[in-house]
Image (spheres, coloured by chain):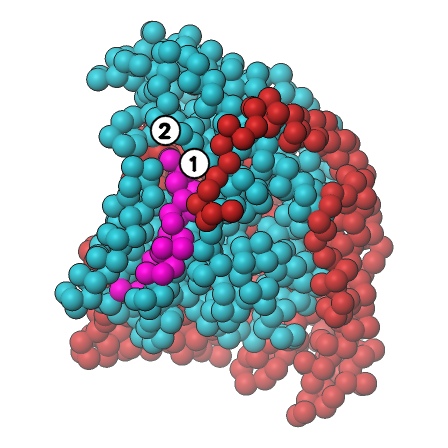
Chain colours: A red, B cyan
Amino acid sequence: MSPRKQATSTDLTLEELLCSTERAWERGSDALAQALEVLSRDALRILKEEQVTPVRSVVAPEGLSEALALPAHPGSLAEVQERVTQLLLSAPSTSGRRFFNQLFAGHDPIGTPTDMLASLVNHSMYTYKVGGPLIVMEEVVLRGLRRLAGFPEDGGGIFTPGGSLSNLSAMLCARDRFAPSAKEEGTPKGLTLYCSEESHYSVKKGAGIVGFGRSSVRAVPTDERGVMRSDALLEMIQADRRAGSQPMMIIATAGTTVLGAFDDLEATAEVARSEGLWLHVDGAFGGTALWSDALRGLCAGLERADSFTWDAHKAMGLPLTCSALLTRDPHAPARALSEQASYLFQSGADLLNPGTRSLQCGRRNDALKLWAAWQYHGDDGWTARTDRLWALAQTLTALIKRRPQLELLMEPQYLNVSFEYRGRSSVSICERLERERRALVGYAYAKGRCVIRVAVVNPELTRADLEALLDEVEAVAPHCKPASA
Amino acid sequence: MSPRKQATSTDLTLEELLCSTERAWERGSDALAQALEVLSRDALRILKEEQVTPVRSVVAPEGLSEALALPAHPGSLAEVQERVTQLLLSAPSTSGRRFFNQLFAGHDPIGTPTDMLASLVNHSMYTYKVGGPLIVMEEVVLRGLRRLAGFPEDGGGIFTPGGSLSNLSAMLCARDRFAPSAKEEGTPKGLTLYCSEESHYSVKKGAGIVGFGRSSVRAVPTDERGVMRSDALLEMIQADRRAGSQPMMIIATAGTTVLGAFDDLEATAEVARSEGLWLHVDGAFGGTALWSDALRGLCAGLERADSFTWDAHKAMGLPLTCSALLTRDPHAPARALSEQASYLFQSGADLLNPGTRSLQCGRRNDALKLWAAWQYHGDDGWTARTDRLWALAQTLTALIKRRPQLELLMEPQYLNVSFEYRGRSSVSICERLERERRALVGYAYAKGRCVIRVAVVNPELTRADLEALLDEVEAVAPHCKPASA
């Protein structure tokens, strides 16, 4: 066959072509209906198994490629459905009662099934023509988040596929203010960014991606709680300016990954104001503190920021991904990101075409699960949920203090509780807990130590679950490597 | 309340805290089980309604914000589920039999329910510790796609949230080859990129984002079919070099958005080789041609490219998003994107930690639906499906030719069929078709004309559906504005 040859309708009659390729395509909806009929059954089966199995067996990667190989010939619907369910049951459960490994865990009673329906209806959230009322729904959710953050309700924002890309989008908004020609002419040299040394790795990563370079990010020292030192921040900005750089953006963190530290946003906002910098707050994890009367004070000053990242798929318990970028200036995201595309943006004002303010073209409907969960919980429910997480974190802290072999790293500032087993390696303990199917939990380096970091983000857990976690740590630790190893 | 004050366990006893915040949190799984029990019912209801309603009523945005407002107090599970279903039924259906507006449409019988389960189990695809066998599953799918594309099976790749971000990731891989210090020191000036004037808007957008600047993108003229002229490409590269720029990357398109044109990849690869440039192929839409004996020749030369974007959520019919970036060099994505993060990447080789080669940190499991659909269809089924789409596109073409009032823009090269109604405005026709609930289809500008562009991407459609679309066009056109208006 010649490289550019192509079949034409003269090779076969059209009737022949359509008939010869029919197979089951015209009956695809029947097959889907059949698959959907058993979906509830499979979903309930997975849910039930999660509840009775604290941690699933670890499956080694060897040999899996062959077991999961792609076939040349079709399989039966029922067999494939069963294989999918079995595969899912062989992967670690992120909703089991001994899962403490990430900043997310568990299910939302309505957010989860709603996200499942979002896959079924399959909207792409770029235009009102295709998204219809769902476009307004997304804006309603963004408005609700802005209200809570103390941002102007008519500010800007967009849902993105995760906190890393929300932070990256904020960098583009800031770049656009300080170097309006960058989008057209390229990122200029010399712009500098500031974040704490405890900030998420997506800050350096994003700076590398958008052309500032990772070396443009200054890691500001933190105090003993992991909070960015605003005196050091100011000094570094002024030193950079003297050295000929152009300080541009501060990325404060609300809820760091390891310590759960909240940078002092009042002090940071004051530095940003006096030095004329863009202030972004990465609240991917900690934004949820805004729901709690007890924790809200940690975010004081947020209302003075220019932009804010908030992941509802972390401490708000919704399925991945559900991340919002909020901006004070309603036009900032579109100025940084919009392109003309007459084949796509065909009607409605730009406000109704969110594709003009997104990194993406096609975009899954991530906002719907949060809208639905908000309808179910209400503001009051989110507050109760967050208060419960905070109570669980404090309970875990108290339980650790009662066990002489365990040493708490520090009083929790948020939902992260870190500790060591005296004299034993936290790495070794975490690996053994996983291998022996006792718990999934991660280690982290903080304050010169390696600790076991527990993220308390599943409100369904009870005091008994937290006791059980510590029991498991105490059961394996004596058999683990010494701390110095 | 003072800005940084925070409640402590001394304010209330822990028992009081846990009890006072219990509400239904410990029974969340019961509520979820209750919601999942009716999920199949709601899903089947939506599916059935789609089948009987060709196009839903257009809902105006006015007043929707109030109707969708977020409540202060909790709602009942059943009521919220019903509201979600009603909201979804008020948005345009992307699977109705008169939906031709995007490069995606319809459902996959197994890909859709599998994606729904992916939301339930909620894995984040960054590490083997959390993803387990699902990490190998993703690699198996990438390997299958590489095999089909003629790439080395042991090449690299990653699933991203859409073709725009796959293309952007490819730009970062290319940048890393030509300016290895860019990630650390910033994107240098003078690197230039080449794509056809018919390429997707994400090319210019991506160049703006990663710091090259939109002006670094050269729009190469196309021939009368919309195919990039490789002679002009070579001339532009050489002229840029003479002018002191550093040509870096060619982005060829396999399946353009409007005309469905495939750049000549053999000729483009030869230019890339002789000039030493990175060749990326944006096959977001057209990669699916590889499945068809009749269409595969359009991609001849693809096996010589450095990287390739393929969206399985377009012509392969899977739910958004399901986009793969494939690279020849297995290490290219990680070199461009990896960061250290000891709190996240805790075990396993980098191959088992795909977070090291992604733009994202948390990442939804987009590969699973493609794996499941592949198990169901097999290679043979994908071929039959693609052949059927091609037969439908040719059928539509033949039907247009038989109607004297309709004028075909050109013989279809792929699944895009464009035409005009003689003397009437395509914009006006498309708007009226939507308003009168007859069909959802978009207009596009091509070859100096404004045409009605039909993307034939739903294999469940029949010849009768295509006839019906043309009937609707002929019914409204006489009442639409003249073409010159």
Point out residue B469 in the picture as x, y percentages from the top left corner.
Answer: 48, 17
Q: Chain of mark 1?
A: B
Residue B153 position in % (x across, y down): 59, 64
Residue drawn at the location 62% of the way across and 75% of the way down = B349
The label shown at residue B410 is 2
| Residue A416 seen from this side | no
> x, y percentage for residue B16?
71, 55
Q: Specify whether residue A350 is painted magenta.
A: no
Q: Amino acid at mark 1?
A: Gln
| Distance CA(mark 1)–CA(mark 2) | 9 Å
Which of the labelled discs sits on residue A250, or is there none?
A: none
User: Marks 2 and 1: in contact by CB < 8 Å?
Assistant: yes
Name the residue nearer the viewer: A6 or A132.
A6
Q: Nearer the viewer, residue B225 or A269?
A: B225
Instruction: Return the mark for residue B413.
Output: 1
Q: In the rendered structure, which segment of residues is drawn in magenta?
A: B247-271
Q: Give the residue displayed 28% in from the left and 43% down from the top.
A: B222
> Which quadrant of the rendered structure holds the C terminus of chain A?
bottom right
Compared with residue A65, is residue A337 higher up or lower down, i.e. above or below?
A: above
